[in-house]
Image (spheres, helix red, strand yellow):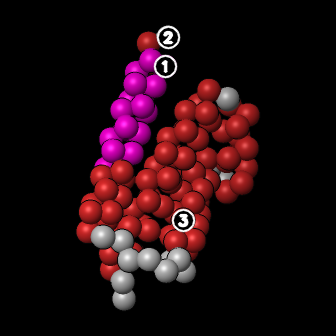
């Protein structure tokens, strides 16, 4: 088992999922029809967002697995930092958005 490749692939897939869910959350709050559409897919908009995150993460993971490469420890570290920063920035964006929305 190529654990560095698994960590690399999952961290990049997770970072993409974080960015997508952040964008979808803001878009759904700004456009109620979009939120209604998400809710119509699964019964609740958060379940739909979770499925989008799961699918995106899985697609990136599965797309990278067959590629013959062995990421270096530095590449794995970078991919993990990308995930950390995506999570921190997503948190900051959502916090700022909801504070802005509450103040208007």
Percent position (x, y) of residue 101? 49, 19
- Please report the residue visible at 66 percent of the width from the left and 53 percent of the height from the top: 43
Residue 5 falls left or right of residue 33: left
Labelled pair 3, 1 in contact (Cβ < 8 Å): no
Judged from the image, the secondary structure of the residue bearing numbered disc 2 is loop
Report the residue marked by disc 3: 60
10 or 50, which is in the foreground?
10
Residue at image position (46%, 25%) is 97
Circle 3 residues within 10 Å: few <14, some 14–19, many ≥20: some
Query: Would you identify the image quadrant in which residue 75 lies?
Result: bottom left
Residue 101's label in the rendered image is 1
Q: CA distance from mark 3 to mark 2?
A: 38 Å
Inspect this view and state whether residue 80 appears.
no
- For residue 39, say whether it is visible: yes
**Residue lying farthest to the bottom in this orientation:** 1
Residue linked to disc 2: 104
Label 3 to label 1: alpha-carbon separation = 33 Å
Q: Nearer the viewer, residue 15 or 79?
A: 79
Choose the circle earlier in sequence order: 3 or 2: 3
**Disc 2 to disc 1: CB gap under 8 Å:** yes
Over which residues does the magenta segment extend? Answer: 84-101
Q: Secondary structure at mark 1?
A: helix
- Whether residue 39 appears in magenta in the rendering, the answer is no
Mark found first going from the N terminus, 3 or 1: 3
């Amino acid at each position: 088992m190529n654990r560095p490749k698994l960590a690399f692939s999952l961290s990049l897939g997770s970072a993409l999922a974080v960015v997508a869910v952040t964008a979808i959350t803001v878009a759904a709050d700004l456009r109620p029809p979009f939120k209604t559409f998400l809710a119509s897919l699964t019964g609740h908009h958060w379940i739909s967002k979770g499925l989008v995150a799961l699918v995106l993460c899985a697609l990136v993971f599965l797309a990278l697995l067959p590629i013959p490469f062995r990421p270096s420890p530095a590449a794995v570290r970078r991919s993990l930092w990308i995930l950390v920063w995506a999570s921190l920035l997503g948190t900051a964006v959502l916090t700022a958005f909801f504070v802005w929305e509450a103040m208007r």
